[in-house]
Amino acid sequence: MLVVMDIGAGRARVERVVKRLEKAGFSVRRHTLGGALAAVITEGEEKGFDIRDLRAMDGVREVVLYGEPFPLSGRGRGSRTSVLRAGKVEIGGKEITLIAGPCAVESERQIFATAREVAAAGARFLRGGAFKPRTSPYSFQGLGEDGLRLLRAAADKCGLLAVTEVLDVSKVGLVEKYADVVQVGARSMQNFPLLREVGRLEKPVLLKRGSGATIEEMLFSAEYVLSGGCKKVILCERGIRGFDRAVRHALDFCGLLALRQTTRLPVIVDPSHACGVRTHVRSLAMAAIAAGADGVMVEVHPRPDEALSDAAQSLSFREFRALVEGCRGVAAAAGRKWPSSRRK
Ligand code: PEP
Ligand code: MN
């Protein structure tokens, strides 16, 4: 770490900064640059030290970190994305990950029909919420364990892996029992006790970006999960709240590129929750793959207009097939492999 002091900060201010650093366990060397400008160079563990406190100290002009701010999720010196495994399926490798299914599991008929459809289209993962984080407490909240059971059965029947959200620390064990990938939703991205609890899992954790969260906050949330011992975190950009009400959220492609540069973790994109309307989902999914996403997660429903949650953004089977065709072409152009259909 390099701490640059203001010209004329004075000995007392410099010494206050030195003392603070030493107290935090750093070893400090003082340098005088160009006469009065004092730079304090330190060696020690930067992880866990909140430099905002240092930046706020009287006389401090700038603090420069040399260390990796995200020791577990950061790219470090390696430039490659880590390839994770869920069952036999790789995430973050050459093949694009396609996760598809309804917003919520509603019935046996609904989830089995959707599972058949998405498996035929090449998806390796079936999504479906059993515990739904709804804005209104009066909206459909999900089927709970019955929903988990149905999701598991439909996934198994069609050779798919199951992705579902856990909302609550007390339900992590239950969700783990049924899911292959445990999702932490946008609203829970900074639920630190939940992050610590899913950090104990061996299964992959799909961490969605909060609609008001910065990239830095998202990566610190990933650090929470990884520091619990979990080795498999997948990040998901799903749109952030902008000022324009013409769309539900702004899908942050710049953030996606920043993540690509900063983290070694696979990054997927959820275009459904980003735009909130089905007409834009296909274009956004194609754009996400063109921009380097490792996968897409989309909401599909046999009768979208009757969906109990997120009806407006749910794709019909026909629209889903059109998305798959579009994405297949973009994946090829981007040098990625699109998952092959297993339709007989
Ligand atoms: C979801 O994927 O089911 C969901 C609720 O999304 P988000 O957490 O991104 O709103
Ligand atoms: Mn949804």
Image: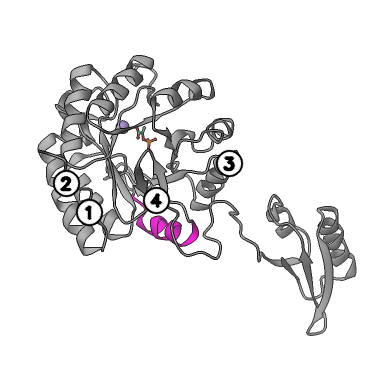
Q: Is mark 4 on a helix, strand or loop?
A: strand
> In the rendered image, which residue does mark 1 sit on?
286
Q: Distance between the residues labelled 4 and 1?
A: 15 Å
Name above or below for residue 93 compared with residue 103: below
Q: What stretch is highlighted in magenta?
A: 251-263
Q: Do the residues labelled 1 and 2 touch (CB within 8 Å)?
A: yes
Residue at 23% x, 26% y: name it.
157
Amino acid type for the residue under numbered disc 4: Val
Residue at 36% x, 54% y: name it.
93
Q: Looking at the image, is mark 4 or mark 1 nearer the viewer?
A: 4
Q: Do the residues labelled 4 and 2 touch (CB within 8 Å)?
A: no
Dominant secondary structure (helix, strand or loop) of the stretch shown in magenta: helix
Question: Which x, y percent locates residue 270?
Answer: 32, 44
Tell which quarter ligand 1 is in: top left
Amino acid type for the residue under numbered disc 2: Leu
254 is within the stretch colored magenta: yes
Question: Which x, y percent locates residue 275?
Answer: 27, 43
Q: What crowding class fits label 2: few (fewer than 14 Cα within 10 Å), some (14-19), or many (20 or more)?
A: many
Q: Distance between the residues labelled 1 and 2?
A: 8 Å
Q: Which mark is residue 267?
A: 4
N-term mark: 4 or 3:
3
N-term mark: 3 or 1:
3
* Residue 210 in view: yes
Q: Do the residues labelled 4 and 3 touch (CB within 8 Å)?
A: no
Name above or below for residue 5 compared with residue 49: below
N-term mark: 2 or 3:
3
Query: In front here: 337 or 304?
Result: 337
Q: How far apart are marks 4 and 3 (CA)?
A: 17 Å
Question: Which x, y percent locates residue 1?
Answer: 71, 65
Q: What crowding class fits label 4: few (fewer than 14 Cα within 10 Å), some (14-19), or many (20 or more)?
A: many
